[in-house]
Amino acid sequence: MSNSEENRLDRLESLAENTLTELQEIKLGLQEIRLGLQEIKLGLQETNQGLKETRAIANSNAKSIEALTNSLAESKKEWEKDRRGLYQLLGQLTRSMSDFYEVQSDFYNRFDKEERQSRMVEILDRYFPPENPANS
C-alpha cells in the first residue's frame, strides 16, 4: 500500500471512530431524552390523577353546596311558616287579652253597681225602715 492510501485509510478509520463516538454520544443523549420523557410522562400521569381528584373534590363540593342551599331554602320556608304561626298566636293572645279586660271591666262595673245599690238600700233602710206587716 502506498503512503497516500494509508493516510486515506487512517483518515477513514479516524472518521469512522469519530462517527462511532458521536453516535454513541447521540445514543446516550437519546437515552437521557427517553428517561426525561418517561419522567415527564409520569409527571403528567400524576398531574392527571391530581386533576381527577381535584374534579372529584370540586364535584363533591358542588353537591354539598347545592344540598346546603336547598337545606337553607327549606329552613327559610319553615322559619317563615313559624313566623306566620307566631304572629297568628300573638293576634289570638291580643284578642284574648282584650276579651279578658272587657269581661274584667264588666265585672267591676257590675260589682260597683251592685255595691252602690246595696249602699243605697242600706241608706234607704236607715231613713225609711221597712214596715213590719206584723205591727200594722
Image (cartoon, rainbow, N blue to C red):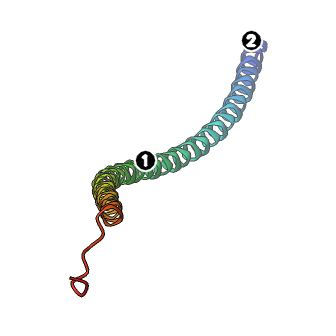
- Residue marked by disc 2: 4
Q: Which residue is mark 1?
A: 65
Which residue is most to the bottom?
Answer: 134
Q: In the rendered image, which quarter contains the C terminus? A: bottom left
- On residue 34, the disc is none
> Is 88 in front, or is 14?
88
Q: Residue 118: where, in percent of width, then height?
A: 33, 65
Circle 1: residue type = Ile
Counting residues from the N terminus, which is met first, the one under dot 2 or under dot 1? 2
Dot 1 crowding, Cα within 10 Å, few <14, some 14–19, many 20+: few
Quarter of the view holding residue 18: top right
Question: Identity of the amino acid at label 2?
Answer: Ser
> Residue 49: x, y in percent?
54, 49
Where disc 2 sits, the SS reads helix
Q: Is residue 11 left or right of residue 64?
A: right
| Category of crowding for the residue at label 2, using alpha-carbon neighbours closer than 10 angstroms: few (below 14), some (14–19), many (at least 20) | few
Quarter of the figure with residue 37: top right
Quick one: 64 or 31, which is closer to the camera? Answer: 64
Which type of secondary structure does the marked residue at label 1 adopt?
A: helix
Q: Position of residue 88 (x, y in %)?
A: 28, 54
Q: Is residue 44 above or below residue 23?
A: below
The answer to whether 79 appears left or right of 16 in the picture is left
Residue furthest to the front: 136
Of residues 74 and 8, which is closer to you in this image? 74
